[in-house]
Image (cartoon, rainbow, N blue to C red):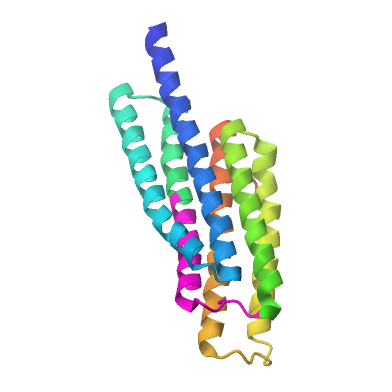
Amino acid sequence: MALIRSVFQEELDGVSQSLVDLATMVTESMQKATSALLNAELSIAEEVISADEKIDTYQHELDSRIIDIIARQQPVASDLRALITALRMSADLERMGDLSHHIAKVARLRHPESAVPQELQSTIRTMGEVASKISEKVGTVIETRNTLMALELEKDDDEMDSLHRSLITVLTSGSWDKGVPSAIDITLLGRYYERFADHAVSVSRRVYFLVTGEFAPA
């Protein structure tokens, strides 16, 4: 029985490590997507777009592994909660990869020009930095199950929300003179970064629930 439990624990640890790996992949995609966007780097944009398929495949394989573990081990209580939570976290992380992919596609669409007007470059750069910081922290939260750090992501998300609002303010101020296509680009980009952070917060909240058995305070 002890041997069976040891093998099962190794499988659980493997799932956790795969989630950390997925978070690392997503962080790299976001960093590259932001660079491609700001610097009109077509080759980097293409890397991100291609990498999204790898992220999707990794997530699908992880989900299949989790379902197989549930079927074979028939876990109960905290073990079942850990596996169901892992399924939901993998979906959030995969969606974060999709959002990086969307950003890279905007960069590719507007190449050889940058999709971001000069006066908004600083804001978008900061949004990219905040997004990368958040996804890196998510990886740490998954690995360490640090509930205090999980709660910190709410504040990080507040910073992203503030940046997103500043973009909308510029677009609706009445002084926008970059045309409709550019306004659409910025609106979409702002939403992509904002949703990226929202999914990261969702992952952190799931870790909090996994550890405590309670939902994180709003």
Please say if 10 is above or below 158: above
17 displayed left or right of 1: right
Taking depth in this image into account, of 114 and 20 the one nearest to the observer is 114
Specify start and end residues of the magenta stretch as a single range: 94-117
Please say if 25 is above or below 81: below
Q: How many marks?
A: 0
Residue at screen point 60% across, 76% down: 116
Q: Position of residue 163 (x, y in %)?
A: 68, 68
69 displayed left or right of 126: left
Q: Is residue 216 magenta?
A: no
Q: Quadrant of the N terminus?
A: top left
Residue at screen point 50% across, 60% down: 100
Residue at screen point 71% across, 53% down: 155
**Res. 214 visible in picture:** no
Magenta span dominant secondary structure: helix
Q: Position of residue 157 (x, y in %)?
A: 65, 57
**Res. 101 visible in picture:** yes
Taking depth in this image into account, of 3 and 61 the one nearest to the observer is 61
Taking depth in this image into account, of 19 and 86 the one nearest to the observer is 19
41 displayed left or right of 14: right
Taking depth in this image into account, of 112 and 168 the one nearest to the observer is 112
177 displayed left or right of 63: right
Q: Position of residue 37 (x, y in %)?
A: 56, 69
Q: Position of residue 9 (x, y in %)?
A: 45, 20
